Image: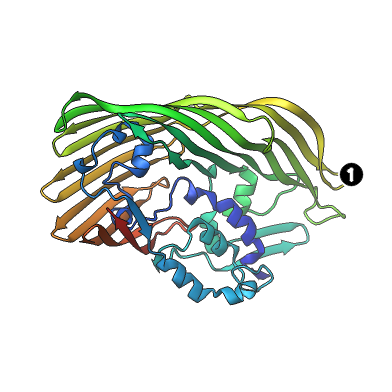
């Protein structure tokens, strides 16, 4: 018997969605996309990981834009393929449609259509073969098997979507918003063999997934100093430090196991399998006593003529104490045939820790040529980027290479045209923001104002 891939598509998508998204990152800047994610500026995300860069004059490195606006040509492409007037019947969003493919929907979430997809990452699109006998069950996912992760996988991120800290004579103070999320899964050996290797189901065997998840966020009043501690504008050592008082607004966590246990016969009796769920959740809702904690950032930067080298560490010691959390323990009640809570404890103190990030990077600028390289370990994985930009009059030629957190090599190339205070940039780059283990290729455009 053969059924379409949608039969198990939802489960497969949930299992596979996290791995490529782990810190892969979304780029909204064509200049960065042209250099495979490398940064040739001292602002933005680079400054987020190294506060010393606040003190280096903007003219030290050319091309420091004030604002960059992405050209959403990918959205035009998407709306042509999926008109808003027909979204309710669109197979991509309608599970009742025979053409519904949950893997494509997950890929859309992982890779929003901001830029134009020149070559989308190919999706597994095949039938699933089931082998069913009187006392046997097996499944062959075909080309879909390769997105089943053999190791622990998950989605994770730590970001500061808003950071308002005006400076005065090197001192800066303000407030930032912080977010932290992690979702991790691990298939047990029996389920892995059943899905990825096509082994038949066995008697009296547990098939399940171990999971852990955390999501938290809030604001943090911050204060710090960034300045030159040695030398002059042409040759000097810069230092930056920031202290944060983290105020947690909401928090939730979950650790557990979900699965089934087969019986003496695969197909026998009214309940051939026994569900098994054991989960412990903890949360602090909006309006509860706020979480609180302290942490900081520190960074150094050396400037020697056209060369800038920096190293920064952020979210050092950032442990958040949540004084008013509720912890629920749940399990599957075989008598009531549902998941039920068997234990609840309120007003419990919980602690979480933000991942510490490390960034080492350099930028070299000479005679119209700028080269940049960086290594970032955000506590969730390591990425490397190298990029170069050659300016010829109003024209800028760019290229780059990088390695993402999936340890896949990515490439980029592009061009920019500078007209007065504005630059129109376009670039082509590969990416792995998809479930497929093959790269996609996109065309990115953006407008920068200097």
* Residue that badge 1 annotates: 335
| Residue 6 x, y percent position in the rendering | 63, 66
351 or 102: which is nearer to us? 351
| Residue 164 falls in image quadrant | top left
Tag 1 secondary structure: loop
Residue reaching furthest to the right: 335
Residue 284 falls left or right of residue 225:
right
Residue 343 falls left or right of residue 362:
right
Residue reaching furthest to the left: 367
Q: Which residue is drawn at 34% across and 35% down?
A: 359
Q: Residue at x 26, y 59 (%)?
A: 422
Residue 251 falls left or right of residue 267:
left
What colouring style does the render use?
A: rainbow
Q: Is residue 415 visible?
A: yes
206 or 44: which is nearer to us? 44
| Residue 259 x, y percent position in the rendering | 71, 46
Residue 441 falls left or right of residue 219:
left
| Residue 79 x, y percent position in the rendering | 50, 72
**Label 1: few (<14), some (14–19) or many (≥20) C-alpha neighbours in 10 Å:** few
């Amino acid at each position: 018997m053969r059924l379409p891939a949608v039969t198990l598509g939802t489960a497969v998508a949930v299992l596979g969605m996290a791995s490529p998204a782990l810190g892969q990152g979304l780029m909204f800047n064509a200049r960065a996309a042209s250099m495979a994610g490398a940064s040739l500026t001292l602002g933005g995300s680079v400054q987020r990981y190294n506060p010393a860069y606040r003190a280096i004059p903007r003219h030290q490195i050319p091309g420091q834009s004030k604002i960059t606006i992405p050209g959403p040509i990918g959205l035009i492409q998407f709306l042509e393929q999926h008109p808003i007037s027909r979204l309710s019947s669109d197979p991509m969003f309608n599970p009742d449609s025979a053409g519904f493919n949950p893997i494509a929907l997950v890929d859309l979430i992982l890779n929003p259509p901001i830029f134009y997809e020149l070559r989308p990452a190919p999706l597994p699109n095949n039938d699933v073969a089931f082998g069913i006998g009187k006392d046997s069950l097996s499944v062959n996912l075909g080309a879909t098997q390769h997105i089943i992760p053999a190791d622990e996988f998950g989605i994770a991120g730590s970001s500061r979507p808003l950071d308002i800290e005006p400076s005065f004579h090197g001192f800066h103070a303000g407030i930032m918003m912080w977010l932290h999320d992690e979702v991790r899964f691990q298939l047990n050996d029996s389920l892995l063999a059943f899905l990825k290797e096509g082994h038949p189901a066995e008697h009296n065997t547990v098939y399940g997934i171990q999971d852990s998840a955390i999501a938290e966020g809030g604001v943090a009043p911050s204060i710090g100093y960034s300045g030159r501690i040695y030398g002059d504008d042409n040759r000097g050592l810069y230092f930056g430090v920031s202290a944060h008082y983290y105020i947690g607004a909401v928090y939730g966590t979950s650790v557990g196991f979900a699965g089934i246990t087969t019986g003496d016969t695969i197909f026998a009796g009214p309940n051939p399998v026994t569900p098994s769920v054991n989960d412990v959740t903890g949360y602090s809702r909006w309006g509860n006593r706020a979480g609180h904690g302290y942490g900081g950032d520190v960074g150094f930067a050396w400037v020697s003529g056209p060369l800038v080298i920096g190293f920064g560490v952020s979210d050092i010691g950032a442990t958040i104490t949540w004084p008013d959390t509720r912890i629920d323990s749940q399990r599957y009640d075989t008598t009531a045939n549902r998941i039920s809570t068997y234990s609840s404890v309120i007003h419990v103190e919980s602690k979480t820790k933000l991942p510490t990030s490390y960034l080492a990077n350099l930028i070299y600028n000479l005679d119209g040529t700028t080269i940049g390289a960086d290594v970032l370990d955000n506590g969730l994985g390591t990425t490397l980027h190298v990029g170069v930009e050659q300016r010829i009059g109003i024209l800028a030629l760019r290229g780059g290479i990088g390695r993402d957190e999936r340890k896949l090599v990515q490439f980029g190339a592009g061009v920019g045209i500078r007209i007065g205070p504005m630059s129109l940039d376009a670039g082509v780059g590969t990416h792995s923001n998809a479930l497929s283990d093959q790269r996609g290729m996109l065309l990115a455009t953006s407008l920068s104002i200097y």
